[in-house]
Amino acid sequence: MTEHAKDRIPNPPQAVSAEEWEEARAEVLAKEKAQLRAADALAAERRRLPMVEVEKEYVLEGPEGKATLLELFEGRPQLIVYHFMYGPSSDHGCDGCSMVVTTSAIWRTCALGTPPSLSSPARRCRSWRLSSAAWGGRHPLVLVVRE
Amino acid sequence: MDDIPWYSSFESDFNPDFGVSPPEPQSDQYQDGDTFGLSIFVRDGDRIFRTYFTDRRGVEPLSSNWALLDLTPLGRQEEWEDSPEGRPQDPPYEWWRLHDEYDEDGGSNA
């Protein structure tokens, strides 16, 4: 980040009255709503996508040893897999993937919902499982790395 | 991130079959040519189906970073963005660091 950016934004937004700002914001809000509705329509299309059967049996290595892709579902009907960029000879995962995982919206929601008594890492892990169950146990987030 | 259930697909066809890794690791490339993506699977009893895949910027919804930065006047401060003249911009990706590799001010120390 360049030096001047810390005290002040270069070429900052124009300062206006609250009324003028509200008017300008309303224009953006209308476009934001249109964008949301378009996103809803796209999600509806996604829900109607066809699917392809996974013919092979894949065996992965997880926290409790070997696990098949089927076992990753943990009895739930849906599975979200993030394929994390992590080459076999690398000593750390991709910076961007690490940032994504650290700031995952799903993950953060669980962390924020953690009562203070569940603050140790081991407890957080349990809390994550609990949160997962609280969503009807339908959406486990699983990260797959190739190391 | 000890709490995340990590699974390794080492020596399986999983990542190559789903289009995020080369068939064999490429030692001359970053992360051996491995890439990233998001797959959605559903189950019908013991049968598994893939319903969705996205990669590159398609994985942005997974993180809150970009959505939040897109609400600010400075944005992501990346060169490709349409920003008012004079706002700081750098090449994309290069400001990202592992969480303990930023400098004291939170800058990328590039």
Image (cartoon, coloured by chain):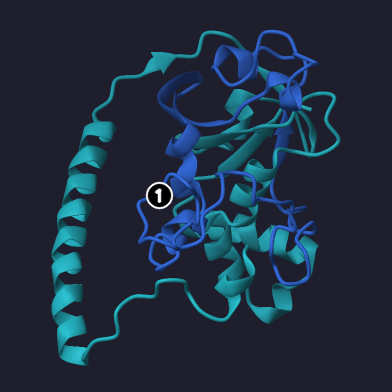
Say what amino acid the circle numbered 1 marks: Glu
Q: B92 or A58: nearer the eye?
A: B92
Q: B30 or B91: nearer the eye?
A: B91
Residue B35's place in the image compared with A118, above or below, is above
- Chain the render paints blue: B
Quarter assignment of residue A143: top right
Under circle 1, the secondary element is loop
From the image, tell me which residue sits under label 1.
Answer: B81
**Residue A108 pos. (x, y %):** 57, 62
- Chain A representation colour: cyan
Q: Residues within 10 Å of mark 1 (few under 14, many from 20)?
A: few
Q: A125 or A108: nearer the eye?
A: A108
**Left or right of residue A107, residue A95 in this image:** right
**Residue B13 pos. (x, y %):** 66, 12
At x 69%, y 20%, the residue is B33
The answer to whether residue A45 is seen in the rendering is yes
**Left or right of residue A56, residue B12 in this image:** right
At x 27%, y 34%, the residue is A47
At x 45%, y 38%, the residue is B57
**Left or right of residue A129, residue A67 in this image:** right
